[in-house]
Amino acid sequence: MIPFELVEPATLQDAIALIDPDDPTVRPIAGGTALMLMMKAGVFRPRRLVSLRKLDGGWTGIKASSDALTIGAMTPLSAVERSAEVARHAPVIVRTMTRLSNVRVRNVATIGGALAHGDPHMDLPPVAIALGGRVRIAGAAGERELAVEDLLTGYYETALKSGELITSLYIPAQGKARTAYCKVTAGAADDWPALGVAVALETEGATIKSARVVASAATPQAMRLKDAEKVLTGATINDKALQAAGDAAAGEAEIIGDVRGSTAYKRELLRVYIGRTVRAAAGTAK
């Protein structure tokens, strides 16, 4: 790696001021698990890194209320994994964390970094989208809020403007919704996925009242599959309905092939795993 400047501001305002929106070699760094790999590979050569580790305020921590769960952007993934509040409010996040990379990475990687990186293989974004998650963002122009599904715009691309930082992840109360995430890997269980599918359902008996279906890893970014959602809404959970939803998902999703599987292979995975994830969410997995 080439030499670079590392600065550690104490306030959000200082951090934003140190990030030059016109200089792509100046970047913020949270846990650095992805950024350091890019630097070692020579893909990114920074002039300055603005560390967010010493920022004051509510950047780290988990707050739960009757209507929401808020996770500070600098909260390590391992803290989320062990949180009783997260387990009560959104247990699917805790279940997802146990297979997200390894414990060394989870001890360092942060919630904000996992979302801001825009990597389509990340496990957290599809789950956050299924839960109706939103991010709070701060920049020189002020603060704003954005749904996670709108934050992710393409392959390693987000809607963050130059100089903007994610400050927290907000998950609304889930009510009676039940959520599951299925991860398909070509290697170890905690490897990068060839496909990720997250589903959130509200059911009445065996009938689906509403559904949110999200695919990732096989797609350019984590994205909702609204054709599959339409098929599922009002349907009875049975093989015929799940096959129809899988067909709809395979037909609407933009699939990208890579070393973890061809486009055709991943499309067939998606077709099959829509049904498996719906059954897992509904508690009827065989």
Image (tube, rainbow, N blue to C red):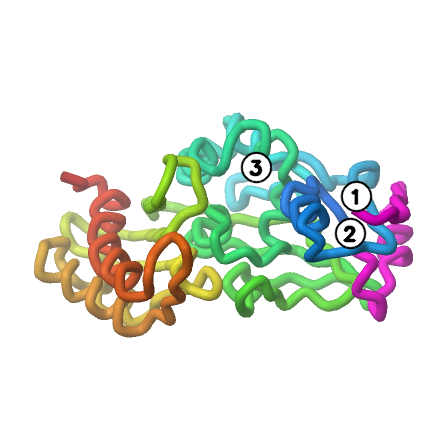
Which residue is at a point 21% across and 46% down the rendered structure image? 279
Kind of residue at disc 2: Pro
Q: Give the answer, above or below, for where 263 lies relative to 117.
A: below
Is label 1 or label 3 in front? Answer: 1
Kind of residue at disc 1: Leu
Say left or right for 271 vs 158. left
Q: Quadrant of residue 116?
A: bottom right
Can the viewer see residue 155 in this picture? yes
Tell me if label 1 and label 2 are in contact, CB under 8 Å.
yes
Say left or right for 8 vs 219. right
Q: Quadrant of residue 208?
A: bottom left
Which residue is at a point 70% across and 36% down the rendered structure image? 60
Find the distance from the CA under tag 1 to the CA under tag 2. 7 Å
Point out the tag, 1 or 2, that comes first from the N-terminus.
Answer: 2
Point out the tag, 3 or 2, that comes first from the N-terminus.
Answer: 2
Residue carrying label 1: 52
Q: Position of residue 254 (x, y in %)?
A: 38, 71
Find the distance from the CA under tag 3 to the CA under tag 2. 27 Å
Residue carrying label 2: 28
Q: Nearer the viewer, residue 202 or 46?
A: 46
Q: Position of residue 18 (x, y in %)?
A: 90, 55
User: What kind of element bears circle 1?
Assistant: loop
- The magenta span reads 1-28
